[in-house]
Amino acid sequence: MKIREASREDLKTIKALLPYLVAFTVPEDRDSEDFWMSDYDLYQKIVEGSRKDGFALVVEVSNQVLATALVSFRDEILSGQPSSHLEVIVVHPDYHGTGIAQNLLEVCENKAKERGAYCMTLHAYHKNMRARSFYEKLNYRGEFLRYRKVLQGSKASMLTQRKTS
């Protein structure tokens, strides 16, 4: 297993892996792509060098990319200390349970620490119990709940209603 910086040549494979992030039932008013398309945009910017505030890694086994992670840097929301944020970590489902994700996350944490991050944050969808238990096993702790309400009658909600009809 080899963990390395992602390159432009990896972007197509990364884009194919990202839908595996949505390993849960998507709410009716959401499109599964909503959960990963902005991550792909960030991957492109970081890999191509137009954004310097993060890094992207891939895991190769037998010259095949099986996993990826994307980390950005920002100030911690409460303390303001330098922080890192795990935007994405995804492993091809055929390789779940092999330790790839844990090894990849450890490398991400070490790289973030080397770049001065005080902590690493991440988001996990509340119904994605597999992801949540993985992070909790690695000593990540929940801090916030995000609430959301679709505002009926707004232009965006009417577009969503047409899309789901």
Image: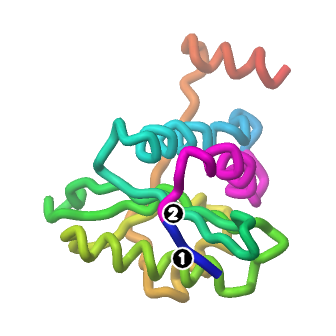
Amino acid at dot 2:
Leu
Q: Is residue 41 left or right of residue 100?
A: left
At a point 23% along the width and 60% down the height, the residue shown is: 76
Pick out the residue farthest to the left: 80
Front position in the image: 158 or 125: 125
User: From the viewer's perspective, is residue 106 above or below residue 22?
Assistant: below
The C terminus lies in quadrant: top right
Q: Position of residue 6 (x, y in %)?
A: 52, 57
Percent x, y of residue 104:
54, 76
Residue 123 higher or lower than 9, as above or below: below
Most common SS among magenta residues: helix
For disc 2, the marked residue is 57
What span is colored magenta in the figure?
5-26
**Label 2's element?**
strand
Residue at which label 1 appears = 104
- Say above or below: 123 vs 59: above
Q: Are marks 1 and 2 in contact (CB under 8 Å)?
A: yes
Q: Label 2: few (<14), some or many (≥20) within 10 Å? A: many
Q: Residues within 10 Å of mark 1 (few under 14, many from 20)?
A: many
The amino acid marked with disc number 1 is Leu
